[in-house]
């Protein structure tokens, strides 16, 4: 699957976000080794702590279905569902990724005109895992 197609699926996932507090909607599309794609969106909560990021939503759906081999994720976000700038994964999401992904796992951060690519090692240097 191309990064462009994965980015399009992240944009589509963003439309499902529940973000009444911040107004920032985020979507993610997670590519598994077998070609399966899991989409996720952010889900906010009034007490903020139980809020879940789009990336973790996608990972948890995939893991529930038995997937453990991941190759890439595309992430996009913006105020009121309009993609604006980079939305890199937060620290918690980076650590969840590291639990299940190798350092060369690709992260595509979608922009209004394309995407920027990083590896997990670039976004989470000197990480620890099992």
Image: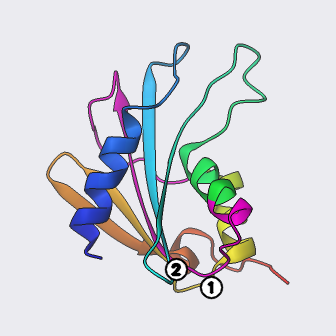
Q: Is residue 122 above or below residue 113?
A: below
Q: How crowded is mark 2: few (under 14 residues within 10 Å), some or many (20 or more)?
A: some
Discs 1, 2 touching: Cβ within 8 Å: yes
Calculate the distance from the C-alpha at mark 1 to the C-alpha at mark 2.
6 Å
The reply to whether the magenta stretch includes residue 12 is: no
Residue 48 horizontal side relative to residue 81, left or right: right
Q: What element carries label 2?
A: loop
Residue 112 horizontal side relative to residue 40, left or right: left
Residue at left offset 52%, top offset 24%: 18
Q: Indicate the position of residue 76 as horizontal and vertical percent values.
A: 37, 47
Residue 117 horizontal side relative to residue 16, left or right: left
Q: In this view, does 94 lie above or below 111?
A: below
Q: How crowded is mark 1: few (under 14 residues within 10 Å), some or many (20 or more)?
A: some
Q: Which residue lies furthest to the right in this view?
A: 130
Residue at left offset 69%, top offset 31%: 51
Q: In which quarter of the image is the N terminus?
A: bottom left
Residue at left offset 77%, top offset 16%: 47
Q: Indicate the position of residue 115 as horizontal and vertical percent values.
A: 25, 61
Write down the region rendered in magenta. Answer: 62-89
- What residue is pinned by disc 2? 105
Q: Quadrant of residue 79?
A: top left
Residue 6 horizontal side relative to residue 46, left or right: left
Name the disc covering residue 84, or none. Answer: none
Q: Which residue lies furthest to the left in this view?
A: 113
Name the disc covering residue 102, or none. Answer: 1
């Amino acid at each position: 699957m191309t990064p462009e197609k994965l980015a399009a699926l992240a944009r589509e996932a963003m439309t499902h976000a529940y973000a009444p507090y911040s107004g920032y909607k985020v979507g993610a599309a997670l590519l598994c080794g077998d070609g399966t794609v899991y989409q996720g969106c952010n889900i906010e909560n009034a007490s903020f702590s139980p809020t879940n990021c789009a990336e973790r939503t996608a990972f948890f759906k995939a893991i529930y279905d038995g997937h453990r081999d991941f190759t890439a994720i595309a992430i996009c976000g913006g105020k009121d569902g309009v993609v604006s700038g980079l939305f890199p994964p937060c620290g918690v999401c980076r650590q969840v990724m590291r639990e299940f992904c190798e350092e060369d796992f690709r992260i595509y951060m979608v922009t209004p005109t394309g995407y920027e690519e990083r590896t997990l090692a670039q976004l989470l240097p000197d990480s620890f895992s099992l």
